[in-house]
Image: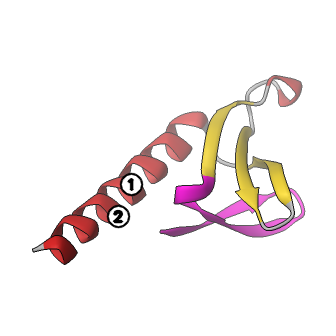
Amino acid sequence: MKLKMQTISGPVIIDSNEVTQFYPDHESGGELTAVEYFTDEGRCTTRVRHSFYQVAEALASAWHVDDASKRNRRG
């Protein structure tokens, strides 16, 4: 599932299936969350304007929806 997240320079679309890890950004004092993911160009790290818990909840929801749709396709 594609998620639209806000960065300092504007919105970014991140595919939840491409996320490798996410963590509170210590350089910002925890105000931002760093999200690492893969793109066609390789590995990318983006700092988003969402709390760690907001990112965790959004990713968990997206992964749950993706898993449910895969199960439904299998029959």
The coloring applied to the image is: secondary structure
Which residue corresponds to the image point at 81% horizontal and 50% vertical from the top-left?
43
The quarter holding residue 70 reads bottom left
Above or below: residue 29 compared with residue 58: above
Nearer-the-camera pick, 20 or 74: 74
Residue position for label 2? 66
Percent x, y of residue 24:
69, 29
Percent x, y of residue 36:
72, 44
The quarter holding residue 42 reads bottom right
Horizontal placement of 14 versus 3: left or right? right
Q: Amino acid at mark 2?
A: Asp
Above or below: residue 11 compared with residue 42: below
Residue position for label 1? 63
Whether residue 65 appears in magenta in the rendering, the answer is no
Find the magenta span and give its range. Answer: 1-18
Task: Name the chief secondary structure element in magenta.
Answer: strand
- Cβ atoms at labels 2 and 1 below 8 Å apart: yes
Q: Which residue appears farthest toward the front when viewing the image?
A: 74
Give the quarter of the figure containing the C terminus. Answer: bottom left
Which residue corresponds to the image point at 72% horizontal and 55% vertical from the top-left?
38
Helix, strand or loop under label 2: helix
Q: Amino acid at mark 1?
A: Trp
Percent x, y of residue 54:
52, 44
